[in-house]
């Protein structure tokens, strides 16, 4: 899943070469409760520096789960110098997802819980939304807002 998140983030920045695209930071999400009522949650006007720090931490924790290492910051590399991926398991994928979900709650200043996020955010936009929050916290706007043909 982590590799998919990173590839999706890369694709968001590089796709649409035939059109001009503008991007912004993640500003809001819509959660739906069990009764079907929608709730728009708006990100704080200023996302605190602690969220940036959490994004950096998320990056390292994800790497530690997804790549072979000795647990002390030393990573196994292949003959070309690339990090060697760990075997992907359901447990490792869910660990990474847990980290991203917790981060998302932090990005929105704890206005909802992880459970409310899991139950209320549309699964068809789940991974994309988690990626937008992560990239926004790092100062990389990835939410497409306007497309004009060249």
Image (tube, rainbow, N blue to C red):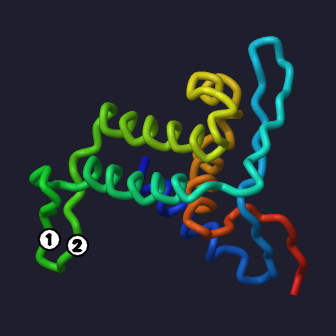
**Residue 20: x and y, percent?**
81, 81
Q: Tell me the residue at 77%/83% (across/down).
A: 18
Gap in angstroms between the C-alphas marked 1 and 2: 5 Å
The dot on residue 148 is none
Q: Is residue 121 left or right of residue 2?
A: right
Q: Residue 32 occupies which quadrant of the picture? A: top right
Q: Which secondary structure lies at badge 2?
A: loop
Residue 61 in picture, x, y percent from top left: 32, 50
- The residue indicated by pointer 2 is 82
Residue in view at x 70 percent, y 26 percent: 120
Residue 141, percent from left and from top: 68, 68
In the picture of the structure, the residue carrying the numbered disc 1 is: 78
Residue at 63% x, 61% y: name it.
136
What is the total number of numbered labels drawn onto the structure image? 2
The 10 Å Cα crowd at callout 2, few under 14, some 14 to 19, many 20 or more, is few
View extreme (bottom): residue: 150
Dividing the picture into quadrants, the one containing residue 45 is bottom right
Decide if residue 22 is on the left or right side of residue 138: right
- Quadrant in which the C terminus is drawn: bottom right
**Residue 104 in the figure: left or right of residue 17:** left
Mark 1 nearby-residue class (10 Å; few <14, some 14–19, many ≥20): few
Taking 76 as reference, is 40 above or below it? above
Q: Is 117 rendered above or below residue 128? A: above
Q: What kind of element bears circle 1? A: loop
Pointer 1 with pointer 2, Cβ within 8 A: yes
Q: Position of residue 24 (x, y in %)?
A: 76, 66
Q: On screen, 35 above or below 77?
A: above
């Amino acid at each position: 899943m982590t590799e998919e998140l990173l590839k999706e983030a890369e694709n968001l920045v590089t796709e649409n070469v035939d059109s001009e695209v503008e991007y912004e930071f993640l500003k809001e999400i819509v959660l739906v409760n069990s009764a079907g009522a929608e709730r728009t949650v708006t990100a704080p006007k200023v996302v605190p520096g602690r969220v940036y720090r959490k994004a950096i931490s998320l990056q390292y924790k994800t790497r530690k789960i997804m790549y072979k290492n000795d647990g002390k910051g030393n990573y196994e590399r292949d003959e070309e110098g690339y990090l060697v991926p760990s075997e992907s398991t359901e447990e490792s994928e869910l660990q990474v997802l847990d980290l991203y979900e917790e981060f998302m709650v932090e990005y929105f200043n704890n206005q909802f819980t992880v459970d409310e996020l899991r139950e209320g955010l549309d699964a068809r936009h789940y991974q994309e939304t988690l990626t937008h929050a992560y990239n926004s916290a790092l100062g990389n706007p990835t939410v497409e807002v306007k497309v004009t043909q060249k």
